[in-house]
Image (spheres, rainbow, N blue to C red):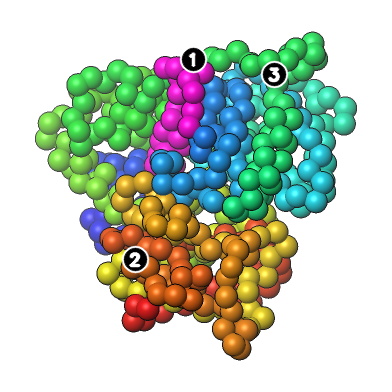
Amino acid sequence: MIGSRSGEDIFGDETGDLRLLAARAYVWGFALVAAAKLRLQLTNPRDPFAQRQSTSAGAPLNNFGHQQALSDPTLAGVAPNVDTLYSLAWLDLGTESFVLETPGFGSRYYTFQFGYADTAAEVSLGRRTHGATLPPVFVQGPARAAPVPPGMIEVTSPTRYALVAGRILVVPDDPADQTAVRELQRMIRLRPLARYLAGELGPNPVPEQRPLDEGARPVDPDLVVLRDLGNVLRDWIVSPRERPLVDSFRALGLSPEAGFEPKSLPEAAKAAVVRGLADGEDLVEAKSRHLGRTVNGWTVNDRGPRFGDDHLLRAAVARDQIFVTVPEEALYPVTATDADGRRLGGEHAYRVAFAPGALPPVDAFWSLTMYRRDGSPLVPNPIDRYAIGDRTPGLVTEPDGSLVIRIQHRQPSTRRTFNWLPAPQGLFHLMMRLYLPRAAVLDGFWAPPPIERVAAV
């Protein structure tokens, strides 16, 4: 029975058990489907050049979109930050290679992450790797059909689709600084190799994309996840290493050739498959609370997006932290519980106390962001504050030099409002961002302080 397994071992042996196969398919495919949903949401294939809201970095496939305003509660998605303006481009590398050119960023922090269609990543380039100016980057797909032009950095994706995720640091509540970043964004250029060599400018051509709901109609609501995974598989390049696992999913009606064929599932088998999909969902939820080491109630994924064969970790990270960058660029401690293991909720008040001299040791920036578990992730509140960090104006330290952040739904009185991080009425979780973490963070000598439940102030 799947419930007797820890989760990590569900891929450990061959089986004809449909319930276990369905759990495997759910866990293996979760990140692939989540990435595809994000790609389709941002590129909007039905109307790719439609106007986006200012907080969105969406754009047509093979083109850059630039976030013009910091994320706020109007932005749907998974855990957006409120520290940087995003510049995002989804690429179809099936037939073309691309050249990315960027301006000089001076002393400003910036990074460009190259994420694959399974949400993994190996490379993030920017100030950490190249200082103020990044050389042109040559992005290729699995075929690697073209030689790398002289003077360029090569980045190769093992998947057909890839995400280029730029993050440029801004000063909160500083319109002039955000204007300066928008000017930098306008100087970012992305072109297919042929257009780059020809010196062509303007928007790039937009190829078609397969919708996740294509075919397999009607499909039982309990099996929609298999339909979505089936359509991702139809565009997937199956590696030799994954071939046996993907072939085993044929017993569920899944194949790269035809996607999902629900009629191949006998009615008697459907109940077992549905239970297996629910088992997979439970495994991903449980793993999202224990991503790696646990300290002071926080779970820390020290591997970042370098998942290897750990499909469960990949799924759990995609659930709440999709497309995190590599750990030397940033770490993302996260918690949904207080120091005593109780779920965080707006009916209680909390505090996070950084001891004197014990603020996060980073070389770029740190922040603590509030996310609710249901609905749009960022929490509407009367002071429009969604995170507290090293650039938050007006923070007040205690007489001993410590920094105490107050977390509660009700607005605190007087002075304590300065350090207030507003919470929703319901369940929430907290994510810390540690960009350019120092050795003390990477080695585990520094840890986030505990979330203490206290009386409201």
Residue at the far left in the pictured view: 268
Q: Do the numbered discs 3 and 2 sit on residues whose CB atoms are within 8 Å?
A: no
Q: Residue 265, image x and y in percent?
A: 20, 29
Query: Around disc 3, counting alpha carbons within 10 Å, would you say few (fewer than 14), some (14 to 19), or many (20 or more)?
Result: many
> Is residue 352 a member of the stretch shown in magenta?
no
Q: Is residue 39 magenta?
A: yes
Report the Cα–Cα distance between label 3 and label 1.
Answer: 16 Å
Q: CA distance from mark 3 to mark 2?
A: 49 Å
Q: Nearer the viewer, residue 256 or 39?
A: 39
Q: Quadrant of residue 137?
A: top right
Is residue 178 something one can see in this rendering? Answer: yes
Question: Which residue: 41% across, 41% down?
Answer: 74
Q: Position of residue 202 (x, y in %)?
A: 68, 15
Q: Earlier in the sequence, mark 1 or mark 2?
A: 1
Q: To which residue does mark 1 refer?
A: 208
Instruction: Give residue 158's position: percent from left, percent from top.
Output: 60, 33
Q: Residue drawn at (61%, 88%), measured in percent from left and top?
A: 400
- Residue type at mark 2: give it: His
Is 275 placed left or right of 338 in the picture? left
- Please report whichever mark, 3 or 2, sits nearer to the chain's N-terminal start: 3
Q: Within 10 Å of the Cα at label 1, are there few (<14), some (14-19), or many (20+) other Cα atoms?
A: few
For disc 3, the marked residue is 192
Image-quadrant location for residue 125: top right
The magenta segment: 29-53
Which amino acid does the dot numbered 3 rest on? Pro
Give the camera-side residue of 61 and 13.
Answer: 61
Secondary element type, mark 2? loop
- Residue under numbered circle 2: 409
Q: Residues within 10 Å of mark 2 (few under 14, many from 20)?
A: many
